[in-house]
Image (tube, rainbow, N blue to C red):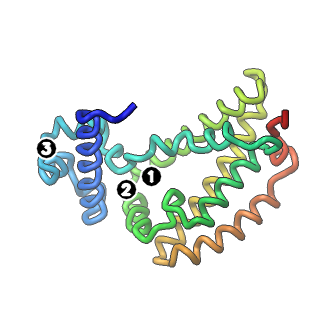
């Protein structure tokens, strides 16, 4: 269904407010900027800001909705004969090799990460997002394998794969903050992914292999 005019205007307004807020956060720091200042800079009311973003942290992590179910989507969409771990490793390699902004391989990512490092509220929200990513992945694994509610394996596998994702994102963030070239970081992280795969046990690597029929 095509997007209507009203929906498009709402989406554009939301994006504009978020962009204005992010610019202010990068320039002055998250804690130094108030919602009232964001509203004034975006030429909207404070109530309008809160209508789109219930919390100040939501202005910074405005694209987190697409992140929290990312690994669950990868697992649900894995190929025939492919395990959950293989799907996650493949998707990460593809994004890293493509020097994708989705994994932070973009010049402006350094400024983004510095804002997070200097704001405890953002670090807490980032941790919460990571927990939601892992919970969604566990649910996908549980549904896909038909595991019983008391079966610990989906939780354990989700924890291992969450660690893989966190390692990649952590290294990218650390290296990009140094002002390094995204292409160089990409090549190093591809080697890191090979090392990570070697560290994973056979039970993890062979869990939830999709049938070929």
Disc number placed over residue 107 in the picture, else none:
none
Tell me the residue that label 3 is attached to: 44
Quarter of the image for residue 26 reads bottom left
Q: Is residue 51 visible?
A: no
Distance of label 3 from label 1 (alpha carbons): 28 Å
Q: Residue 129, relative to residue 140: is it above or below? A: below
Dividing the image into 4 quarters, which one contains the N terminus? top left
**Marks 2 and 1: CB-CB under 8 Å?**
yes
Tag 3 secondary structure: loop
Tell me the residue that label 2 is attached to: 119
Is residue 145 rendered to the left or right of residue 112? right
Quarter of the image for residue 114 reads bottom left
Density class for disc 2 (Cα within 10 Å; few <14, some 14-19, many ≥20) is some
Q: Is residue 54 visible?
A: yes
Density class for disc 3 (Cα within 10 Å; few <14, some 14-19, many ≥20) is some
Q: Where is residue 32 in the image (x, y as percent from the top left)?
A: 24, 57
| Nearer to us in this view, 25 or 88 | 88
Q: Where is residue 33 in the image (x, y as percent from the top left)?
A: 22, 55
Tell me the residue that label 1 is attached to: 123
| First in residue order: circle 3 vs circle 2 | 3
> Which residue occupies the extreme right position in the image?
202
Is residue 20 rendered to the left or right of residue 59? left
Dividing the image into 4 quarters, which one contains the C terminus? top right
| Nearer to us in this view, 102 or 132 | 102
| First in residue order: circle 3 vs circle 1 | 3
Tag 1 secondary structure: helix
Density class for disc 1 (Cα within 10 Å; few <14, some 14-19, many ≥20) is some
Distance of label 3 from label 2 (alpha carbons): 25 Å
The structure residue drawn at horizontal position 45% and vertical position 47%, both measured from the top left corner, is 124
The number of numbered badges drawn on the structure is 3
């Amino acid at each position: 269904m095509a997007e209507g005019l009203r929906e498009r205007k709402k989406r554009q307004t939301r994006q504009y407010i978020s962009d204005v807020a992010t610019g202010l956060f990068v320039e002055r720091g998250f804690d130094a900027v108030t919602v009232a200042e964001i509203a004034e800079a975006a030429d909207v009311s404070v109530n309008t800001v809160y209508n789109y973003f219930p919390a100040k942290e939501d202005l910074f992590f405005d694209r987190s909705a697409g992140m929290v179910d990312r690994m669950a989507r990868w697992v649900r969409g894995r190929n025939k004969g492919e395990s959950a771990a293989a799907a996650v490793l493949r998707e990460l390699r593809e994004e890293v090799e493509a020097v994708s902004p989705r994994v932070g391989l973009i010049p402006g990512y350094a400024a983004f990460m510095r804002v997070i490092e200097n704001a405890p509220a953002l670090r807490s929200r980032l941790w919460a997002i990571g927990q939601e990513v892992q919970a969604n992945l566990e649910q996908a694994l549980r549904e896909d394998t038909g595991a019983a509610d008391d079966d610990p394996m989906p939780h354990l596998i989700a924890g291992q794969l969450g660690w893989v994702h966190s390692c990649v994102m952590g290294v990218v963030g650390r290296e990009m903050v140094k002002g390094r070239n995204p292409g160089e970081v990409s090549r190093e992280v591809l080697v890191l992914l090979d090392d990570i795969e070697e560290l994973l046990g056979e039970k993890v690597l062979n869990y939830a292999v999709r049938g070929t029929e």
